[in-house]
Structures are given as structure tokens and as C-alpha cells.
């Protein structure tokens, strides 16, 4: 740890804050256009943050130190905390009264693409604040893919193994040219958003709703412009569009990009993709059949709602088209466990992620065989590749920490007075960046508006921990990190 | 797989069934003494099973094949299934009407030292059946320690790592002389049971209650002779005695034996012991303070009940002195998560067990350090020893399978129509061999009498899987096991 490292962290953070402050003028313009006084809040926040950020950037200019792991870890943490706090400023100052804890929670919920909201009365909200919430999600989505593709692999956290696997699988280092890949990613991300917006628009949403929902769909975030979320639209085509885009955005962006730009399907051999699509299909059908048999809902209706809501949970989007917790205990429990699972690595989805399940399954298979022939070699496979012992340990370590945080966080929530369904589901929906929980308060038709400030801080921490794949944050607590 | 192997399995199983059939004459004598007609059921079952077993043993006599892993796995599975079914015979035939599924559940609950019961009206039950339930637990306790000490290590399941650690730690192979160790274990087990019975007796239990509760306490099983379990006695000394013996019997028997017989404390350096005692103390105090502050219960009363009930869950005994699920959501959730944890390896306790938590914690610590210095060596410690990569993987594999079975089993229970609290807590209490669950039906003041037959079969399977450390049973499903 030395001065030039801190200077460098502040410099990059200030630059990013500057970009975010510029984005604040978008909601300002929209509010101005619609004649809502909140435009002043956004403009003022933009100038204030922009001024401070510019000053900080100027003050810390200078030669950049070599990029080390320490710098990487510190930078990622500081950047996400900055985004969380700066994103909260206009939410806190806007006309709609939010406590500071609520504003921070809402901002973190956006930037981590979680999509849990503390705001009631979205339908009558000024457009600026709605757009700002969607923008936070959309930027958060970019941040997450960037983190997963470029930063985490280098830091050997989470994305690490899969990155190594991918690059050796395609065998020509598709990510070696970071700049061109970043450009390709941004183009695909923007095009997907536009395609989704146009589809929503054609299916009957207003332009404004279509744009906002497209941004939060592509980021698998879950903020809506209506309290009722997708139930507001009462439209089958909109559910199909939403479910489809949520599913696409749960796949590794590298696969989408290679397909879109080079017409190559090589990376689609990544075994996490059939795994993810497999369990999405399986639980959608199981839930639909159960809903049909138990509640007498038409099978096609049941299928569409089951697909939309399960895709919404597994993609960690967290929209809802219905209160599926009323469909029966089987659906409640499937939804609860699905909240842990998540999408694929390299996407905007959170959760434990499909590739870890693939690795664990193959370790289990090899381990069982080894019980009979302890001296035989049963390599653990991931597609055509062998998973080394360290990567296996990393996967189990991550999952253990995930569950440990869920347990500790849930117990913390009961100390704040919440019942055990609210406690356990709020923490896992935060950690997996999904959005809705289970139970009366935070279920798919509920929200986080009545959650107390201390509990919101706890859940905010969980959202950040989940988003940064836990270890990226925990490593700051080790003495080794701060040595020298 | 060959004929001599099957012959050998049948021979050993028949011999064990013969011993069990002899034990049936104990409840027969007791019922005869008290003049209850059930004596005929036990006597008849004893003659029937004994006759069949003797015939089978005679028919399969002959030279024993070499002991292989295959033989070991097969034998353990067949033995436990035999105990489960033979134990159920008198329960099914007795005057008190149980369905076949209920009788099998009750028998498995005893033999796996789980202690969940389907019987209501224990207080008015003939003594023979009460004694038989206690005997099943007590034999089950012997079976489990024997399994953990002698069989699982050889098969490299569960106990494996800890066994290796223990024997190299004490450095003089204390378990090399199996026969003398087995004798020592049986002596200690019997003496502990007698000590516990005398203590209960002096504290006010009837002789019969004292003996039965001593057997189910030492086996950390949880069957009681009263529907109200320990709440029936309304006695602080009895709670202290029970909690203390449950705690002792959650420690590795090797430690107790080395201490008792050789006056050696070496093995007590096993790090799982301070870990287990540490979290038992921590959650007992936390629960007591919460109970005191929230419900205004006197602190000393709260401490005693918190200690007894938490020791009861962690030791996987599963007695209850009060409906702790009414103490508040914090206690409910702590009790729920405590149901996963379990005692130490080499004891009669079930659950994930303390040594696995020690290993996982140390893997996490090494993993975090490695993020900063990926090329440095951070060995994973267990006490003074280094845990090799394969053992680490084994621990994570076991825990993952444990959670996987809980998830699948819980979803299964919702398909049988149970609410999610009953579903999730029934499966984990079965898998960890604890006893009570959470919720209206199977909570600490409830029982399993209203659970449907298919659900009882599912839970019976979970009890066996948990008791045999999962892998011992799952290995039978691998194609490798049956090859040749």
C-alpha cells in the first residue's frame, strides 16, 4: 500500500464519477421536458458531482502505477461504493421523500441490477426519477459484464476459471484485444436494448415504458415503472418478449458477441449454457403443470406465466407477472431455491451461476467413482477441459461463503424483527441480485418500502457482496492485503 | 460382484438379525411383568426373526471372502436396511395401530438415533414398546460409533480424514487393536448410560423413565416416554443432566475413551472439539439473552432452557423442554440452521459435523490469502496437521451433497402438500438425525403422526442417507460399483 496506489484509485474513481454526473442530465432533460421540478435536483446533482469529480481527477493526475492485484481489488470496491453513493444523491434529494438509507438501498439495488425497490407509487412518479433508476441498472449491467470479463479473471475471482476455460477452448484468445472486444460488447449491449425496447413498444408499451423496461430487462435488473411490475400490462406478448430477453441476457455475453459479430458458435459449447437452459426449461414446465393441476389454470397461460416468472428469477431479473407465491408451496419453494441459482458467468445475471453447478456435479461424479477405486484417476471435466484442483476448491469455497453469508445475514434480519420467511428470502434475493423475496412484505407483489433503515443497510451490503462475487470484498478484510 | 460376496453379506446380516431378535425378548419380559398382552408380539417377533436369521446364517456359512471396499459398502447398506425393517416388525404388530410406513419410520428414526416419532399418547403406552424404541436408539448409537470408527475410515467416507488425522496425531495407532478398542468403547458406552440413568433417577425420574431417557440421551436420539418430552418433568436438574450428557456424547468417543481408560488428553487437541463447544456456548448464550430481553424470562431460566434445547439440536438429540419456536424469529432461525450443524465426528451425533466446518473455515482463510499472493503456499491446517487437497474436496463434496439432498427432499415434501416450513425443516431434521422440525405440525411440541405415508418414506430415506454419510448409500448408484 502506498500513496501512488491511492492516488491512482481516486483518479480513476473521479473519472467514472464524472461520467455518471454527465448521465444525470438525461433525467434532468426529461423532467424539464415534462415540466417537473425535479429537473433542478438532477441538474444540481450533476453539476455538484461533476465539479467535485473533475477537481478530484485534476488533483490526482499523474503517472499511473503498474496494475497490480492490490490496485484491482481496491479499485473495484471503491468504484462500486462510489457508484452506489453518487447514484443515491438525486434519489435522496428528489421530491419523493426517501430516507438516506432508502436512497442508498435504491441506488445499490439499481447499480447491482438487483431491482428491489423501496418506492411505492411508481405509476405517478416524475419521469426523471424513473429514468434515473433504469439508467443505474443499465450502467450497472455494463459494469458487471466488464467486471466479469476483464477484472475478475485477472484477480482470479469467480470469472477466473471460466475465463481460462473459454480462452483455451476457443484457442485464439478472443479477449486478448480488450479494446476491440469492449467496443463490440457495447455495440451488442446497445443493440439488444434497442431491440428489446422496439419489441416492447410494438407489443403495446408506451415509448417511455418500453425504453425503461428494455434497459432494466437487458441488465436483468427488475426495476419497473409500475408498482404492479409486468402484471400492469396484462399482455402475453410482453411476457414472451420479456422472458426471452431475460433468458438471452443470462447467457455469457462473449457467446452472444462471437455469434453476432463473427457468426461463430464455438463458445456455445460452454456446458453452463445447456445446463442453465435445461433447468430453466425443467422448472418452468414443472411449475406450469403444478399450477395447471392445482389451481385449474389453462395450461398455455400457466406455461407463459411460469416461464416469465422463473426466467425472471433465474436470470436474476426479478420482474413478476403474478403473485406466484399463491400458486402453492411447491412453487414457493422452487422460487426460493431458484433465487440461489442465477444465470451464466459473463452475463448480467447474479447468483451462484450455472458453471459452478456444472463443476460441482462433475466433482461429485468423480468423487463417487473414486470411492470404489481410490487409486484410479477420474479427472473432473468441464466440457472438453479438465478442471484443476484449485479451481474446484475455488468453486466450493465460493458456494460455502455464499451460504454462510446467507445464514449470517438471515439471522441478522431476524434480530431486526423480521419473520423467518422475510429474513431468509430478503437476504438471498439481495445476495443473488434477484429482486423480490417471499412472504407478505417483500414477495413478488410487495416491496421494500416498510423495511427499516438498519435492515436496508444490511441488505445493501449483501447486494454489493453478491455483485462483487464476495471474495473481491472479503479480501479487503485480510491482513495480507494491507501488509507493507 | 460375485456369489461369495453376496453370501458373505447375507451371513453377516443374518448374524446381526439374530442378535436383534434376542433383544426382542427384553421388551417381551417387561410387558409380561407388567401384564400387558404385547409381550406376545415381542416374543413372537423374536422367535420368527431369530428362526429365519439362524436358518439364513446356517445356509450361508462358509469361508469368508477377503474384505474389500465393495463388500464394506454393500454390507453397511444391507445391515442398516435390515435393522430398519426388523426393528419395525414388533412396532407394526403391536396393539397400538401403526401403518407399515409409520412402523418403518419409527424404527428407522430409532436406529438412526433421529428420535422423530409418529406415536401420540406415549404416556399411556405399554412399557414394552417404549423400551423397544429406546433399545433401537441405543443399538443405533453403537452402530453409528462403530461405523464412524471402523468402517467409514476404511471406506474413505466421512470419518476417513478425521481418522487419518487422529491416528497420526496420537502417533501410536490407538485404533490398531480393534478388538481391545471395541471392548473399551462398549464399556464406556454402558457406563455412560448407567451414569446418566442414575443421575436422572436421583433427579426425580421413575426408574423406567430414567433408563429409557438415559439410553436415548447417550445415543443422542431423542425418543421420550412422554408426549411432552422433557417438558413433562418440569425440573431444572433434569435439564442440566440431559444437556450435559448430550454435550458429552457429541464429542468423539475416542477422546472420551482415551481420557477414561488411559487418562490421556492428547486427542482432545482435536480442533473440532473447541469449535463445537464454542458454537454451542455462543448460540446458547445468544438465545438466552434474546429470550430474556424479548420475552421477559428470568435470565437463569432462559440460560438453562436455551442450553438444553440448543445442546439438544446440536447434539442431534432432539429432545425439547419448551416450544422454543415461540421465543421469536431469531430463535426459530438459529434452531433451523443449527439443525444442519451437528456434533463431532466419531460420536453418536449426526449433521454436517464440526470438523467439516473447521476444514471449510481454514480453506476459506487460505483461499483469501491466495488471492493476493497466488504463488505463495498457504497450507490448510487442521490442528497441527495439513489437510490434503483430496480431503478438502471430500469435505466440500459432502456438504454440497447434503444441501442438494435437503433441497430435493424439501421440494418433494411440498409435492406431498406440506407448507414450506414443514417441508424444509422435516427434511433437514431427518437428514441430520435431529428429531423435531419447525412449524405447527412437526415443531418441538408436535410430532410426525399426521404425516402421510409417502412423505414418511421420503423422510425415512433421508434419515438413512444422513446416518450413512450420504456417500455410503449413493455409491451403490454408480455404474462403477456394479461392474464385473
Image (cartoon, coloured by chain):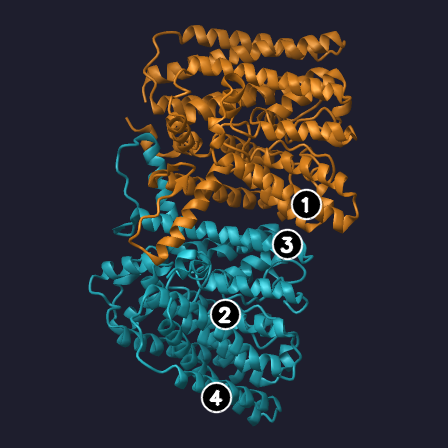
Chain colours: A orange, B cyan
Name the residue that disc number 1 marks. A287
Residue B56 in picture, x, y percent from top left = 44, 83
Q: Quadrant of residue A478?
A: top left
Identify the element where label 3 is drawn: helix
N-term-proximal mark, 3 vs 2? 2
Name the residue that disc number 4 marks. B51
Q: Do discs 3 and 2 share a chain?
A: yes
Q: Is residue A315 above or below residue A107?
A: below
Disc 4 versus disc 2: distance between alpha carbons?
30 Å
Q: Do discs 1 and 3 share a chain?
A: no
Q: Is residue A442 above or below residue A113?
A: below
Task: For label 4, count other residues whose C-alpha is less than 10 Å away and answer few (under 14), some (14-19) or many (20+).
Answer: some
Name the residue that disc number 3 marks. B421
Chain holding disc 1? A
N-term-proximal mark, 4 vs 3? 4
The residue depicted at 31 percent of the width and 48 percent of the height is A377
Mark 1 vs mark 3: give the one in front.
1
Disc 1 versus disc 3: distance between alpha carbons?
19 Å
Chain holding disc 3? B
**Pointer 4 with pointer 3, Cβ within 8 A:** no
Along the viewing direction, whichever of A5 and B141 lies nearer the viewer = B141
In which quadrant is the N terminus of chain B drawn? bottom left
Residue B221: mark: 2
The residue depicted at 61 percent of the width and 52 percent of the height is B411
The residue depicted at 61 percent of the width and 85 percent of the height is B126
Task: For label 3, count other residues whose C-alpha is less than 10 Å away and answer few (under 14), some (14-19) or many (20+).
Answer: many
Mark 4 vs mark 3: give the one in front.
4
Q: As drawn, which residue projects farthest toward the left? A: B172
Identify the element where label 2 is drawn: loop
Disc 2 versus disc 1: distance between alpha carbons?
37 Å
**Pointer 2 with pointer 1, Cβ within 8 A:** no
Amino acid at each position: 500500500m502506498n500513496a501512488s496506489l491511492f492516488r491512482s484509485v481516486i483518479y480513476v474513481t473521479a473519472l467514472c464519477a464524472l461520467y455518471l454526473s454527465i448521465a444525470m442530465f438525461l433525467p434532468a432533460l426529461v423532467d424539464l421536458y415534462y415540466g417537473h421540478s425535479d429537473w433542478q435536483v438532477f441538474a444540481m446533482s450533476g453539476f455538484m458531482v461533476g465539479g467535485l469529480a473533475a477537481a478530484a481527477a485534476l488533483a490526482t493526475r499523474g503517472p499511473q502505477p503498474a496494475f497490480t492485484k492490490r490496485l484491482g481489488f481496491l479499485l473495484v470496491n471503491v468504484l462500486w461504493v462510489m457508484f452506489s453513493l453518487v447514484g443515491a444523491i438525486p434519489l435522496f434529494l428528489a421530491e419523493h421523500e426517501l430516507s438516506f438509507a432508502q436512497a442508498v438501498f435504491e441506488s445499490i439495488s439499481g447499480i447491482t441490477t438487483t431491482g428491489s425497490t423501496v418506492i411505492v407509487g411508481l405509476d405517478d412518479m416524475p419521469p426523471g426519477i424513473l429514468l434515473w433508476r433504469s439508467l443505474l441498472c443499465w450502467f450497472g449491467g455494463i459494469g458487471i459484464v466488464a467486471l466479469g470479463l476483464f477484472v475478475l479473471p485477472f484477480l482470479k475471482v469467480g470469472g477466473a476459471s471460466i475465463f481460462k476455460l473459454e480462452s483455451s477452448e476457443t484457442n485464439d484468445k478472443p479477449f486478448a484485444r480488450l479494446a476491440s472486444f469492449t467496443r463490440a460488447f457495447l455495440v451488442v449491449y446497445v443493440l439488444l436494448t434497442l431491440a428489446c425496447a422496439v419489441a416492447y413498444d410494438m407489443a403495446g408499451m408506451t415509448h417511455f415504458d418500453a425504453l425503461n423496461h428494455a434497459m432494466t430487462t437487458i441488465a436483468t435488473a427488475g426495476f419497473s415503472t409500475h408498482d404492479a411490475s409486468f402484471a400492469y400490462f396484462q399482455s402475453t406478448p410482453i411476457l414472451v418478449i420479456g422472458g426471452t430477453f431475460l433468458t438471452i441476457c443470462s447467457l455469457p455475453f462473449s457467446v452472444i458477441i462471437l455469434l453476432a459479430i463473427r457468426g461463430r458458435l464455438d463458445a456455445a459449447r460452454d456446458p453452463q449454457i445447456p445446463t442453465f437452459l435445461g433447468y430453466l426449461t425443467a422448472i418452468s414446465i414443472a411449475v406450469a403443470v403444478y399450477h395447471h393441476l392445482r389451481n385449474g389454470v389453462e395450461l398455455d397461460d400457466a406455461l407463459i406465466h411460469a416461464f416469465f416468472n422463473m426466467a425472471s428469477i433465474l436470470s436474476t431479473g426479478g420482474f413478476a407477472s403474478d403473485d406466484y407465491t399463491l400458486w402453492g408451496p411447491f412453487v414457493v419453494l422452487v422460487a426460493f431455491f431458484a433465487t440461489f441459482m442465477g444465470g451464466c458467468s459473463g452475463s448480467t445475471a447474479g447468483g451462484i451461476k450455472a458453471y459452478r453447478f456444472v463443476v460441482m456435479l462433475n466433482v461429485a461424479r468423480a468423487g463417487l467413482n473414486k470411492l470404489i477405486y481410490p487409486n484410479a484417476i477420474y479427472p473432473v471435466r468441464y466440457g472438453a477441459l479438465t478442471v484443476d484442483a484449485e479451481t474446484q476448491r475455488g468453486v466450493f469455497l465460493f458456494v460455502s461463503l455464499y451460504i454462510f453469508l446467507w445464514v449470517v445475514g438471515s439471522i441478522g434480519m431476524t434480530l431486526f424483527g423480521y419473520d423467518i420467511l422475510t429474513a431468509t428470502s430478503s437476504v438471498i434475493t439481495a445476495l443473488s441480485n434477484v429482486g423480490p423475496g417471499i412472504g407478505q412484505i417483500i414477495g413478488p407483489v410487495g416491496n421494500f418500502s416498510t423495511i427499516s433503515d438498519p435492515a436496508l443497510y444490511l441488505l445493501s451490503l449483501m447486494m454489493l457482496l453478491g455483485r462483487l462475487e464476495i471474495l473481491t470484498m472479503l479480501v479487503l478484510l485480510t491482513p495480507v492485503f494491507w501488509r507493507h
